[in-house]
Image (tube, rainbow, N blue to C red):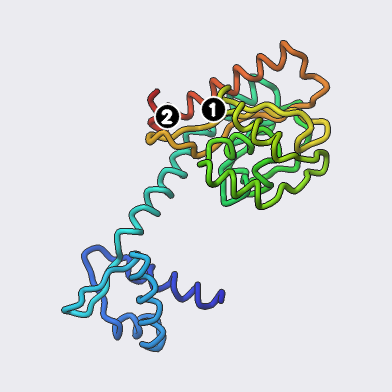
Amino acid sequence: MIQSLQRSMELLETMAVPDKSFSVSELSERLNLPPSTIHRILKTFCAMQYVTKDNVAHLYKLGPALILLGKAATQNIRMNDAAKPILKTLSEQTQEDAFLIIRVGYKGVVYDKVEGPNNLKVVERFGSEVDLHWGALRKVLLAYQTEEFIREYIEHGLTPSPSYEFDKNTLYEELQQIREDGYAASKGNYIANGYGVGAPVFDYQGQVVASIGIIAPSSKMKKEVINQMKKAVLDASKNLSRQLGYIK
């Protein structure tokens, strides 16, 4: 399966030449693969619109679906560049770990992180992933999904975190509250002695593409401190959303 995927990606890379179409025989020769294998891969890619076929000349070229992938990749790169100084400022203001989280399926994945001097030593590095209902920064991502997605996610089953048991009815209410407030805050949902604050990041289309926020020791989160943290996180989310073209 892995070899098949590698062959498919090598075929796309071979075809990545502007204004050029390829025959099955040419691709077979370039990739040193049987024509039957090339034809099978191309048939799949044509169905997905990653490749288009000229039925008269029997030639193939890259298709429109790749434009969407490229735009998404470009946006992610741009978001990372824009987020880094904002995360640094957020960490400096709060003296805590600042995170940028993106959704991948049913998981919230760390896309970037800046450590603060008072951090909890949270073992969350680039690529770390946990369920979307664990903690404030990931609940924000869940809250802004479609009703169908949320329903399917919750019915799929709510695995407990190391420090917290989840109830689906309570979670529905929490997600509604997050949408009304525009941010999420939670204590001990993910880390027993942690307090998280997260807010959504919107792109130019008004879609939530990430969350930004902090995780701090719950012992220091008095009311005044919580309010300061919320303001800093909301300012960071508005700043990053603005840089991604979001206008409200």
**Circle 2 sits in a helix, a strand or a loop, which is it?**
helix
Q: Quadrant of the N terminus?
A: bottom right
- Compared to residue 239, the image places residue 162 above or below, namely below
- Compared to residue 50, the image places residue 81 above or below, namely above
Give the image quarter of residue 117.
top right
Q: Check contact, mark 1 vs mark 2: CB within 8 A.
A: yes
Give the image quarter of residue 46.
bottom left
- Compared to residue 119, the image places residue 8 above or below, namely below
Give the image quarter of residue 197.
top right
Badge 1 or badge 2: first in the primary sequence: 1
Q: Quadrant of the C terminus?
A: top left
Identify the amino acid type marked 2: Gln
Q: Residue at x 83, y 34 (%)?
A: 192
**Circle 1 sits in a helix, a strand or a loop, which is it?**
helix
- Closer to us: mark 1 or mark 2? 2
Identify the amino acid type marked 1: Ile
Question: Residue 50 location in percent, x, y?
Answer: 35, 65
Q: Residues within 10 Å of mark 1 (few under 14, many from 20)?
A: many
Taking 113 as reference, is 7 left or right? left
Q: Nearer the viewer, residue 35 or 55?
A: 55
Q: Residue furthest left?
A: 56
Taking 233 as reference, is 242 left or right? left
Q: Residue at x 62, y 44 (%)?
A: 108
Q: CA distance from mark 1 to mark 2?
A: 10 Å
Q: Which mark is residue 243?
A: 2
Q: Residues within 10 Å of mark 2 (few under 14, many from 20)?
A: some
Q: Residue at x 83, y 22 (%)?
A: 219
Q: Which mark is residue 86?
A: 1
Question: Residue 54 location in percent, x, y?
Answer: 21, 74
Taking 168 as reference, is 75 left or right? left
